[in-house]
């Protein structure tokens, strides 16, 4: 299959590559860009592990071909920390036991980032609805909900470094 040239910005860095049109975006992110924080579970849009923020919306990178990302801006979990410091959301996942094996975590962090940027004060029910698109086999979700709620609370009281980044 003839290769195509694409340009895509990931975490602020421009990648210009020749790719096969059939290559999945999730494979491009991991194998070509070396950003292995994005995990691949089911590879058919069910588990949510591969979620990234794509032009301002949380999407499943296993459901897109990389050629569809030509000219687009992407954020992956590697883009959440700054200068080696975890974001408030990441810190709270750690403090509230929002992860165990961590396989689902990057996808949940990215979906939550997008979710809170669009609604900075969701109800617990809304948080749970958002999380219902993500499979976690370890935590029972309680710690994840607590981490999200703690981040929202810190943002309200001004003790967070930032809401989400
Ligand atoms: S690997 Fe993409 S949704 Fe499961
Ligand atoms: S922490 Fe293991 S799958 Fe979620």
Image (cartoon, rainbow, N blue to C red):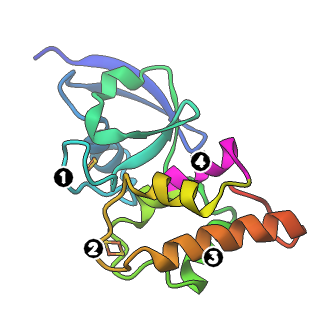
The residue indicated by pointer 4 is 115
- Whether the residues at callouts 2 and 3 have beta carbons within 8 Å, the answer is no
Residue 139, above or below 58: below
Among all residues in the image, which is located at the extreme right? 158
- Which mark sits nearer the N-terminus, 2 or 4? 4
- Name the residue at 50% across, 25% down: 72
Would you say 68 lies left or right of 106 here? left
Disc 1 from disc 2: Cα separation: 13 Å
Residue 7, above or below 48: above
State the SS at label 3: helix
Disc 2 from disc 3: Cα separation: 21 Å
- Which mark sits nearer the N-terminus, 2 or 3? 3
- Name the residue at 21% across, 18% down: 3
Q: Nearer the viewer, mark 1 or mark 2?
A: 2
> What segment is highlighted magenta in the picture?
110-120
- Whether the residues at callouts 2 and 4 have beta carbons within 8 Å, the answer is no
Disc 4 from disc 1: Cα separation: 22 Å
């Amino acid at each position: 299959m003839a290769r195509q040239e694409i340009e895509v910005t990931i975490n602020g860095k421009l990648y210009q590559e020749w790719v096969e049109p059939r290559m999945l975006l999730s494979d491009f992110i991991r194998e070509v860009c070396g950003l292995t924080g994005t995990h691949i579970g089911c590879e058919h849009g069910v588990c949510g592990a591969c979620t990234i923020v794509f032009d301002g919306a949380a999407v499943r990178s296993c459901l897109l071909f990389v050629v569809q990302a030509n000219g687009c801006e992407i954020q992956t979990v590697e883009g959440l920390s700054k200068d080696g410091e975890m974001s408030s959301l990441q810190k709270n996942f750690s403090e509230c036991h929002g992860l165990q094996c961590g396989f689902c975590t990057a996808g949940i962090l990215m979906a939550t980032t997008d979710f809170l940027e669009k609604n900075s004060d969701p109800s617990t029910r809304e948080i749970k609805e958002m999380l219902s698109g993500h499979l976690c086999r370890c935590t029972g979700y309680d710690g994840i909900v607590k981490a999200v709620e703690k981040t929202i609370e810190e943002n309200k009281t001004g003790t967070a470094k930032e809401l989400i980044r």
